[in-house]
Image: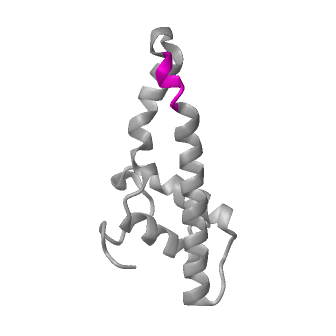
Amino acid sequence: RRDQGETRALARDYVDSHRMFSNYLLLAFPLLLVGAVVPYLSYLSLLTLPVVAGVFIEWFVVGRRIVAMSMARFGRSDAGAFSMGMYAGTRAYLPRRWRLPAPKVEIGDPI
């Protein structure tokens, strides 16, 4: 039920066809975790807040784009910009092979 609706399908296709900063978040997470735990690598912990802020800003912007595309294509949107951004963002940080439902478009394909 979480993945139903034409706006969410558009969000999935948008995320699957674009490279985003969030795609690399799962790779950066171990570095941020080590930086928070190991005392002499405290400079890595300084990166945590900007990375998290950047991710949330990206998710908000992507959510607004998806809602605008949905309004242009379908005349309505199933959800607001914040919830669509969270939906798209949580899909974006997972590697492509872990995403469910499976991606239907390749990176760089028009949607």
Task: Give the residue displayed 45% in from the left and 59% down from the top.
Answer: 100
Tell me if residue 66 comes above or below residue 85 in the rendering: below
Q: Describe residue 26's horizontal placement relative to residue 68 as left or right.
A: left
Stretch of the chain drawn in magenta: 42-47
77 relative to 69 in the view: left or right:
right
Between 4 and 80, the one lying in front of the other is 80
Q: Quadrant of the C terminus?
A: bottom left
Residue 40 spot, x, y in % from top left: 46, 9
Residue 48 vertical placement versus 104 (above, below): above
* Magenta segment main secondary structure: helix
Q: Is residue 108 visible?
A: yes
* Residue 4 in view, yes or no: no
Residue at 50%, 74% (x, y): give it: 9
**11 is higher (above) or lower (below) than 56:** below
Residue 79 lies in quadrant = bottom right
User: What colour scheme governs how the chains and residues are painted in the rendered image of this protein?
Assistant: one colour
Determine if the magenta segment contains residue 22. no
Measured as percent of width and height from the top left, residue 66 is found at 55, 73
Q: Which residue is nearer to you in this view: 110 or 105? A: 110
The residue sitting at 61% across, 57% down in the picture is 86
What is the total number of numbered labels drawn onto the structure image?
0
The N terminus - image quarter: bottom right
Residue at 54% x, 64% y is: 62
Instruction: Return the x and y of residue 70 as percentages of the image width and height.
Output: 58, 81
